[in-house]
Amino acid sequence: MTCRILLYCDDGSTLKVGEELAWELGAQLHEIEASTPEEGMWSRMKTGLFALLSRNLTIDVPDQPWDRSDLLILGAPIWQGRSARPLRQWLESQPALPERVAFLLTSDDSGYPAEAVEDLTALTGHKPVAVLHLGRGDLTSGAWKGPVEHFLDQCVVRYRQTA
């Protein structure tokens, strides 16, 4: 199974989980780079405001044959109930995607991010084969290994059923 992971990360949490997934799946991990004018809280607030106002950011996405993967895992933190603007902005450009996508979402909240999942489903045009959401509590306590195993099982089992 050819798997790629594309994620945007602003504080390292999403990247940490993405690296674990890449290791377990033997996947290629790629990051979306978004330019921010300065570091710190003000920059994060400005980026969050851009997310609300749907203003475009300057982003850099690796040039890969995304649609040639058996599975593409898309990852981002959740801002204001939606996935981070850099990932949404890339998806709005309508890149060619594989039939099988999965979502990795991190947030400060422990509740299931239904709005973010619906948004990503609409942007990709594909129902995800798996969704992994980790709240800040899971990430700081290290209690995310179990949900990651379940997510990996969903990705692999559903692949075997469709292959």
Image (cartoon, rainbow, N blue to C red):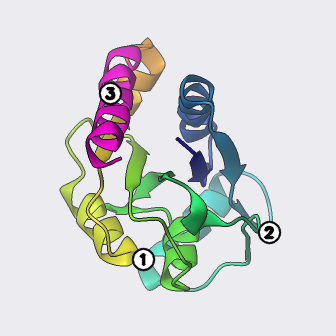
Tell me the CA gap for discs 3 and 1: 34 Å
Tell me the CA gap for discs 1 and 2: 18 Å
Q: Residue at x 29, y 33 (%)?
A: 157
Q: Residue at x 61, y 58 (%)?
A: 44
Residue kind at label 3, given as amino acid type: Asp
- Would you identify the image quadrant in which residue 108 lies? top left
| Earlier residue among tags 3 and 2 | 2
Residue marked by disc 3: 153
Looking at the image, is mark 3 or mark 1 nearer the viewer?
3
Main SS category, magenta section = helix
Residue kind at label 1, given as amino acid type: Leu
SS label for mark 3: helix
Front in this rendered view, residue 65 or 7: 65
Q: Is residue 90 magenta?
A: no
Image x and y of residue 80, in percent: 35, 62
| Magenta region | 144-163
Residue marked by disc 1: 52
Front in this rendered view, residue 147 or 106: 147
Horizontal side of 134 relative to 142 (left or right) equals left
* View extreme (front): residue: 163
Q: Identify the mark at residue 37; answer none if there is no mark.
A: 2
Image x and y of residue 137, in percent: 36, 24
Looking at the image, is mark 3 or mark 2 nearer the viewer?
3
Q: Is residue 157 magenta?
A: yes
SS label for mark 1: helix
Front in this rendered view, residue 98 or 125: 98
Please tell me whether residue 55 is drawn above or below residue 140 in the rendered image. below
